[in-house]
Image (cartoon, rainbow, N blue to C red):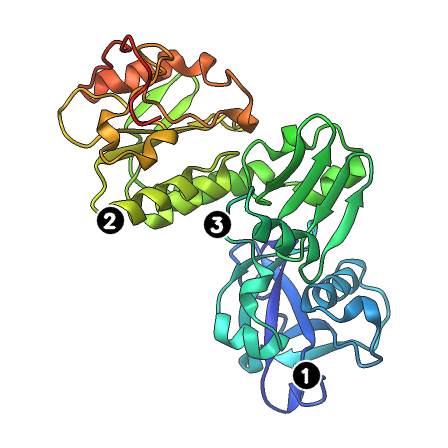
Amino acid sequence: MSIDPTRALILAIDGPAGAHIAFGSAILCRSTEEGTPVVTEGRITAWYEGNTIGAVNLVDFIDRLRCAGGRLQQDYPTTAILSVPEADVRVLGEFDLERGIVIRVRDPEALDAQAGEPAHRLRAPMIFDPEDPATLREVAKGPGGRMIATQPYVWQAGDGRILIQDNRRGRQIFHPDSAGLHHVLSHLPDEASSRLLGSRQADRYLARLRTAFPEAPALRTEHGEWLEITCDEQAAAANALTLSRVGHVWKQQGDAFEGARPHRWFVLFGDHPDPKALVPLRTAAGTRPCGLVTVAAMAAEDPRDAVSLAGPIQKDIEIVGYQGEPGAEVPYLGDIEALTSALGLCCPSAPDGPAAGL
């Protein structure tokens, strides 16, 4: 049995063993690398925090989890610890000890009951619009938020989403598992960035990538793998793993066409251990050589008629690019050409007039 020092399991304790633990308590135990409780002679050691004294900094369940997690990591003397029979324990979720966030909810209904608050507030949504004022309010004002740094301003919501604001890029919101997040945070002191990244960011990225995309890639290039998005779950995973809005735009198109998508979708995932820019794009679903369609063309009656003036490869491509930087797609034009060739597509020349549908 190998213990995972970065992860704890969120528990509910049944029977007499858990009867004296206060309602709403955060209860944690050590986890194996396989994600099971560490058991010694049929018993599990659990650390907990119930805020029975009404501390203002422990009102939210995520803060109680962080407190219990600190006790578990430090293993210092405390009365908030108990040993319980393995049979009395139910695992409700997983908690990242390094980053102080919930990384998986296994039993939402049971966690709702244990926490005394909705479990969905504990885990960052896979798809969200970072420019939506409602999203900003959720991240900035939601329960369990904490300050990470002041120069630049970095705030982490209780569900793990990260708000960064500086003079150069303005306000940005990121999923805690975004690939390339370490680049975004590279200007922070090591202590601050480690609180957001932990020690296994690349491993988490690859594990989630392989889980979401078990099929072989459509094409391998020098920059990584082109993987096809075929369902909502894959679009959501691509959105969370990338510094892009591909999942949000996927949903927009699905709503606009009532699920009958006129395009195939692909995303370029960069190589391990430094996943670079993600280049999401949409290709024509049929054999018509119409290339790719831009985000702006989504409003067009038929997005296949939309073109731009950016050139034969960039036209009709929806590329968010690494960190949304202008021109970020340039290093990947060869990869885009290779993919369109492998799919039997070609990109027509740009027209001599204003782009249709833009």
Residue with the most extreme left position: 287
Residue 154 visible within the image: yes
Image location (x, y in percent) of residue 65 = 70, 65
Q: Which residue is mark 3?
A: 126
Mark 2 vs mark 1: which is more N-terminal? 1
Front residue of 128/131: it is: 131
Q: Which residue is painted at 69% across and 78% down in the image? A: 83
Distance of label 2 from label 1 (alpha carbons) = 43 Å
Q: Which residue is painted at 65% across and 30% down in the image? A: 184
- How crowded pointer 1 is (Cα within 10 Å; few <14, some 14-19, many 20+) is rated as some
Q: SS class of the residue under badge 3?
A: loop
Instruction: Tell me where residue 165 sits by quadrant.
Output: top right
Front residue of 121/260: it is: 260
Q: Which mark is residue 153?
A: none
Q: SS class of the residue under badge 1?
A: loop
**Left or right, residue 18 beside residue 299:** right
Between marks 2 and 1 in the image, the one whose residue lies nearer the viewer: 2
Dot 3 and dot 1 residues touching (CB under 8 Å): no
Q: Which residue is painted at 67% across and 72% down in the image? A: 27
- How crowded pointer 2 is (Cα within 10 Å; few <14, some 14-19, many 20+) is rated as few
Instruction: Tell me where residue 253 sits by quadrant.
Output: top left
Distance of label 3 from label 1 (alpha carbons) = 29 Å
Q: Which residue is mark 1?
A: 23
**Left or right, residue 122 beside residue 232:** right
Q: SS class of the residue under badge 2?
A: loop
Disc 3 marks a residue whose amino acid type is Met
Image location (x, y in percent) of residue 344 = 17, 19
Q: Which mark is residue 259?
A: 2
